[in-house]
Amino acid sequence: MSRAVDTAYGKIRDGILSGAFAPGNHLKEAELVSFCGVSRTPVRSALNRLVTDDLVELYRNQGARVKAWPSDDFDDLFTLRALLEGYAAARAAERISAEQIDKIEESIAEMDAVLASHKPRKELIAEFLRLNAVVHSCIWEASGSARLQSMLSRLVEQSLQARTAAQFTLARVAESHHHHQELLRALQHRDPLWAEAIMRSHIRAARVSLADTT
């Protein structure tokens, strides 16, 4: 049973974070059974886990819906993320290893290649976001705090859900890439104040970009 629950949980979660299930969408059990390839019981268990993740809401006699975030909640979400991820960047600047810096540098170089390519916009942005996740996860890991990584993982999932409701522009991607490059320089110079300031600006810029497209 646990394997079936994990399967259902993973597929529904990915659907939410990818935007396939948009905020406010009704998650019908019968459709989820077909979508996940499991029975109703593991689907229900998976939905309860997603409620705990704050990605789904359950309503009596109405079933489950993808959580829709009011504007004020978005503000809180991104404010908390800016504070925590800024702190993580500051810690990382003091603790990061040469190998971790190399990994971030390699990811940024791959971003350069992606942005210079002629890939379709959707494919280009998907690849950029994959590399973006590598950069951020390296910084969290370098912070040396498992608790901080766990808290950020949930916040980022929720803010990713918010971002999928917006249409990314290439200009926004280029701005984000510039922040990554400056973050790398701050980490290379082991400067916690610089790294924290850039990371906070990076997250706030993402919030403003979302506001501009909603």
Image (spheres, rainbow, N blue to C red):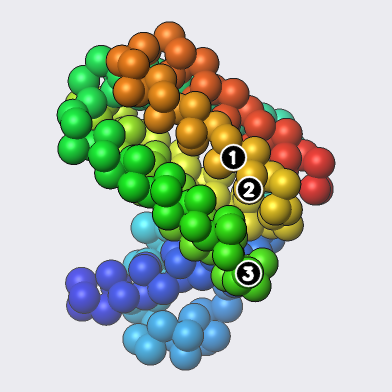
Percent position of residue 67, x then y: 60, 54
Percent position of residue 7, x then y: 31, 75
Mark earlier in primary sequence (1, 3): 3
Can residue 51 be seen? Answer: no
Q: Residues within 10 Å of mark 1 (few under 14, many from 20)?
A: some
Q: Is residue 150 above or below residue 134?
A: above
Q: What residue is drawn where x is 42% and y is 54%? A: 110
Q: What residue is drawn where x is 47% and y is 85%? A: 35
> For mark 2, what is the residue?
173
In the image, 128 versus 55, the foreground residue is 128
Give the image quarter of residue 46: bottom left
Q: Amino acid at mark 2?
A: Val
User: Which quadrant, please, contains the N terminus?
Assistant: bottom left
In the image, 171 versus 91, the foreground residue is 171
Give the image quarter of residue 151: top left
Q: What residue is drawn where x is 48% and y is 52%? A: 111
Can residue 156 be seen? Answer: yes
Instruction: Give me the C-alpha separation between circle 1 and circle 3.
Output: 19 Å
In the image, 171 versus 89, the foreground residue is 171
Q: Are marks 2 and 1 in contact (CB under 8 Å)?
A: yes
For marks 1 and 3, give the one nearer the viewer.
Answer: 3
Percent position of residue 127, x then y: 49, 62
Direction from residue 164 to residue 213 in the image, left or right: right
> For mark 3, what is the residue?
118
Give the image quarter of residue 91: top left
Mark number displayed over residue 176: 1
Direction from residue 171 to residue 61 in the image, left or right: left
